Image: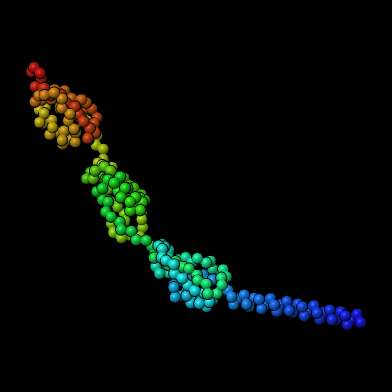
Amino acid sequence: MFKTFFKLLAYMIAFTAAGTVAVFLVYRVVDFEKTGRVPELRGKTVSEASELLAARKLLLKVEGEEYDEDIAEGLIVKQDTEPGEKIPVGSEVGVMLSRGPEIYSMPSFEGQLLKDAKLTLINLGMKIGKVTRVHSDTVEKGRIIAQRPLPGNIDSNEINFLVSLGPYPVSYRCPSFVNMTIDDARILAKQLGIKLIERDHGSKVIFQKPEAKAIIRKGDSVEVTLGRGWGMWF
């Protein structure tokens, strides 16, 4: 009798377990049919993405475009549902398409003051990369000698400048202007790049500051006092 009882109990347990497995499998099948697993769509064309989603009974929705430096124009750059996520069949997966690298129209800045170029770049949404300063005998200090990239359409919003420091500093000993006529003094000063500051009135230089043979630089000023010359009343 006990044997029969245990036998019946074993059959009941086996039947219950089989039923549970069957219910679980049915649930998984039904659940599988109601949901689809989202695939990786980044880097795919719209056609490729549509086929992948259709195989999972999902739909593709293109929501817009944005610039991207790495993914080529026309390919999917973003998706609003992560790969591997399960969503109800018939659902839409939103994607963004790449417009490729952003193209900027770079103006010419050569000859402009660096401070003016900075304001222009701010208004254009661009930025300065590297500024290299060099001496130049032909370009005024603070003005742009060259730029890279050159003017035109480019795929970067950064620009590098070569900016003038002005001429190399030239030092020499100040000549003697004393006893020179003011006309001759002006000619010599112009040749040397010296600015004369004239004091009083007269046809000749009777005094100068700094004195002759003092070290001066090109562009410095020399003050001269004018009179009628040595040996004369002035």
Q: Residue at x 53, y 77 (%)?
A: 57
The percent coordinates of residue 17 (x first, y second) are 75, 77
The residue lying toward the viewer, choosing from 125 and 165, is: 125
Considering only vertical position in the picture, is 133 above or below 24?
above
The percent coordinates of residue 41 (x first, y second) are 49, 70
| Quarter of the figure that contains the N terminus | bottom right
- Number of numbered discs present? 0
Q: Is residue 68 left or right of residue 24?
A: left
The residue lying toward the viewer, choosing from 121 and 186, is: 121
Is residue 163 visible in the rendered image? The answer is no
The residue lying toward the viewer, choosing from 199 and 32, is: 32
Considering only vertical position in the picture, is 161 above or below 68?
above
Q: Residue at x 64, y 76 (%)?
A: 28
> According to the image, what is the colour scheme of the structure?
rainbow
Q: Residue at x 11, y 22 (%)?
A: 227
Considering only vertical position in the picture, is 211 above or below 33?
above
Q: Residue at x 28, y 43 (%)?
A: 142
The residue lying toward the viewer, choosing from 95 and 109, is: 95
The percent coordinates of residue 123 (x first, y second) are 33, 51
The percent coordinates of residue 164 (x first, y second) are 27, 45
Q: Quadrant of residue 191?
A: top left
Is residue 190 visible in the rendered image? The answer is yes
| Quarter of the figure that contains the C terminus | top left
Q: Is residue 62 left or right of residue 159?
A: right
